[in-house]
């Protein structure tokens, strides 16, 4: 069974279309968990009416909550959805193609479930009304634990995880990490296995109000926060070290230690800034990261 997790926030415009696409899946053994993160529009009314109209009270669990931000909201969903074999994160305004869950489940069954497993769907990026769609290219980046410390190649709306990864992810405090999918990527790259599907399995809306930092311009505010003193790279690295540092390889532990510093160290800054392997697949992001490392911001 797959638990589908949706955190909604002012999503009245598209949530019904997304739910329709979920219930059109070829894989039918799933349960939908929705948590509203304090919407001020009609999102909750739309969901309530959808459940009643389609007689889905036994297939959808819906909770209305206060605004915590989507990372903490997804953590609440992950905790509450205790049953299942896999957990699929879902955006409120996307559209799933019919075989999305089936492909993920088949891959999970073919792999060692005792290890953390992460499946990432292929997807198209679309404008708000889905009239223009472009294939988002599958990453060919050599993604390992060391570069998961500073970046993430997975998008939460396309991620499905197994029970082992769920349990490990839930050990973390959402207050100490930036994104739930990023921390899941760190765990998987250190201890498990991931798969980047080449099959298009979803359509992702990308527009001004969408929260996903899919493109470079949406990452810019995070850079300003770093310059203003926010240290989310450090906080996330420390959380990982606290939970799983003793399980890392010697090399991974050494690199993670570089991101634990309370005070600026020129030697450590140079180790990071002039490291001989790539931190990020995007060259412009790579250059910015290395500059921030050299000046002690990361």
Image (spheres, rainbow, N blue to C red):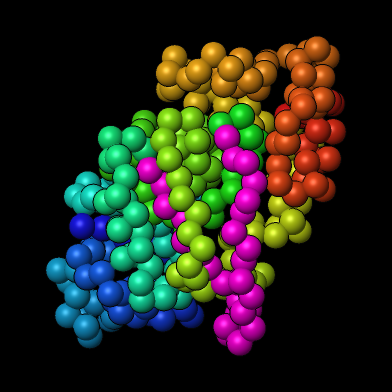
- The x and y percentages for residue 152 are 59, 44
Which of these two is toward me, 174 or 4?
A: 4
Q: Residue furthest front?
A: 110
- The residue closer to the viewer here, 89 or 117, is 117
User: Residue at the location (63% across, 51% down)?
Assistant: 140
> Which span is picked out in magenta?
117-144
Q: Is residue 239 above or below residue 286?
A: above
With 293 as the anchor, is 200 left or right in this view?
A: left
Q: Is 222 placed above or below 298 here?
A: below
* Quadrant position of the N terminus in the picture: bottom left
Q: As drawn, is 53 to the left or to the right of 145?
A: left
Q: Quadrant of residue 30?
A: bottom left
Picture quadrant where residue 201 is located? bottom left
Residue at far left of view: 58
- Image position, residue 166 (x, y; %): 33, 41
Residue 63 in view in this figure: no
User: Residue at horizontal 48%, vertical 67%?
Assistant: 199
Is 138 rendered above or below residue 100? above
Q: Is residue 293 above or below residue 71?
A: above
Residue at horizontal 83 percent and vertical 40 percent from the top: 287
Quarter of the image with the C terminus is top right
Q: Position of residue 16 (x, y in %)?
A: 38, 80
Residue 53 occupies which quadrant of the picture? bottom left
Is residue 130 one of those drawn in magenta?
Answer: yes
Q: Residue at x 34, y 80 (%)?
A: 20
Residue 27 placement (x, y as % from top left): 26, 69
Side (left or right) of 25 relative to 244:
left
146 drawn magenta: no
Left or right relative to 92: residue 222? right
Q: How many marks?
A: 0
- Residue 197 seen in the current view: yes
């Amino acid at each position: 069974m797959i638990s589908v997790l949706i955190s909604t926030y002012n999503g009245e415009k598209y949530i019904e279309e997304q739910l329709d696409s979920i219930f059109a899946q070829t894989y039918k053994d799933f349960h939908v968990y929705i948590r509203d993160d304090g919407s001020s529009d009609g999102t909750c009314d739309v969901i309530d009416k959808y459940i009643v109209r389609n007689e889905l009270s036994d297939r959808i669990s819906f909770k209305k909550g206060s605004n915590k931000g989507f990372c903490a909201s997804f953590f609440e969903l992950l905790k509450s959805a205790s049953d299942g074999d896999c957990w699929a994160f879902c955006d409120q305004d996307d559209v799933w193609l019919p075989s999305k869950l089936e492909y993920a489940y088949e891959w999970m069954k073919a792999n060692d479930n005792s290890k953390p497993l992460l499946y990432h769907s292929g997807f198209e990026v679309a404008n708000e009304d889905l009239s223009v769609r472009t294939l988002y290219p599958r990453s060919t980046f050599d993604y390992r634990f060391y570069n998961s410390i500073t970046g993430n190649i997975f998008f939460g709306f396309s991620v499905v995880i197994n029970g082992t990864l769920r349990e490990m992810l839930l050990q973390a405090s959402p207050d100490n990490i930036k994104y739930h999918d990023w921390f899941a990527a760190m765990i998987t790259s250190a201890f498990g296995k991931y798969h980047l599907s080449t099959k298009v399995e979803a359509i992702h809306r990308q527009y001004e109000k969408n929260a996903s930092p899919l493109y470079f311009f949406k990452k810019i505010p995070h850079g300003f926060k770093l310059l203003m003193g926010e240290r989310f790279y450090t906080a996330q690295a420390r959380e990982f070290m606290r939970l799983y540092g003793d399980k890392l390889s010697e090399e991974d532990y050494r690199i993670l230690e570089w991101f634990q510093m309370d005070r600026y160290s020129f030697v450590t800054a140079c180790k990071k800034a002039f490291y001989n392997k790539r931190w990020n697949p995007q060259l412009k992001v790579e250059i910015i990261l290395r500059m921030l490392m050299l000046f002690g911001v990361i």
